[in-house]
Image (cartoon, helix red, strand yellow):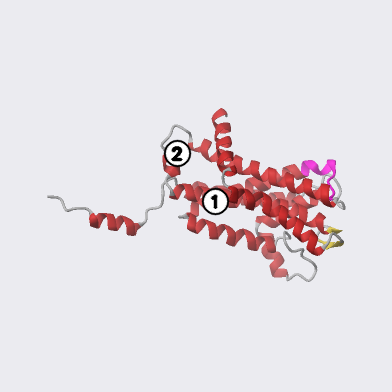
Amino acid sequence: MRTLWRCVRMQNRIFWRTPVAAFFTLVFPILMLVLFTAIFGNDAFDTVYGRVNSSQFYTPGLAVFAAASSTYTGIGINLASRRELGILKRVRGTPIPPWIYLGGVVLSAVWVAALGVVAMVVLGVAAYGVNVEAAKVPAMVVTFVVGSASFAALGLALASVARSVAMAVPTANATLLPLAFISNIFVPFGSETPAWLDLLGNIFPLKHFGLAFGEAMNPLSDAPAFEWHRLGVLLIWLAVGAAVAAWKFSWEPPVISGRSSRRRRTQPAPA
């Protein structure tokens, strides 16, 4: 456990020494909350939670988006980059158990996700009067843990199937951002939403993560506000991500056949 804790601290240092990652993970969702509230106002409108203020709708959704960005995008891109650079191969050759290193990566991403969620909720409560009830805090915590674990497993799966960081970056963005638009994160769905679009959002985990967390902050819901069926969907995606990672994850950098062939051609012929 001491070694695991040291690995978590090491990964945290790496994160804070990368200002771009810190900005898009923590600052960008907060800026979106400020901009959405400034553009659309903080008036009440009909949402999936009932008639609530816009800040009450956007705060839990953007908090979930920050958590998914830290775990899914962060883990997937970082591990793919380190594999391509040969860092994972060198780590594999050290006495550190592989699960310790991966555990440090995952726990560090979850810790950053927790910071993003807390910052978003605190801003919503302090600046916009967002409702948070003490009786529903356990539901918020459980939803965050299950959702972050699910997206961390999917981040490991992304790193497993992406052969290079050039593949991991567009794959992460092309999957997370469109899902945010159809999962009640950026755009509130109403009665006029096409049924096929609503069904598509129900298949993937981001919508269930956002709605379960948002219901725990909904002033119109009854405590303890656990959304067990949505947590069940998140657990299914956790199992899928873990299975793909266990099947496909590699510590070795990808072999580029063209370079290998060129190296073979330039080798001198034996005397």
Tell me: residue 36, above or below residue 120. Answer: below
- Can I make out residue 238 in this image? no
Magenta highlight range: 130-139
Q: Residues within 10 Å of mark 1 (few under 14, many from 20)?
A: many
Three-letter amino acid code of the residue under disc 1: Gly
Secondary structure mainly formed by the magenta segment? helix
Tell me: residue 256, above or below residue 143. Answer: below
Q: Which numbered disc, 1 or 2, marks the residue that appears first in the sequence?
A: 1
Q: Residues within 10 Å of mark 2 (few under 14, many from 20)?
A: some
* Residue at position x 69%, y 49% in the image: 232
Q: Viewed as shown, does residue 55 lie left or right of 74?
A: right
Residue 21 highlighted magenta (yes or no) = no
Asked whether the beta carbons under mark 1 and mark 2 sit within 8 Å of each other, the answer is no
Residue at the disc numbered 1 = 76
* Residue at position x 54%, y 30% in the image: 3
Give the Cα distance between marks 1 and 2: 17 Å
**Percent x, y for residue 70?**
62, 49
Q: Viewed as shown, does residue 89 lie left or right of 107?
A: left
Helix, strand, or loop for circle 1?
helix
Q: Which residue is nearer to you in this view: 95 or 74?
A: 74
Q: Given the current orientation, which residue lies at the most extreme top position? A: 2
In the drawing, what numbered circle is on residue 91? Answer: 2
Query: Which corner quadrant holds the N terminus?
Result: top right
**Percent x, y for residue 104?**
56, 38
Residue 138 highlighted magenta (yes or no) = yes
Q: Given the current orientation, which residue lies at the most extreme left position? A: 271
- Can I make out residue 95 in this image? yes
Q: Viewed as shown, does residue 35 lie left or right of 262?
A: right
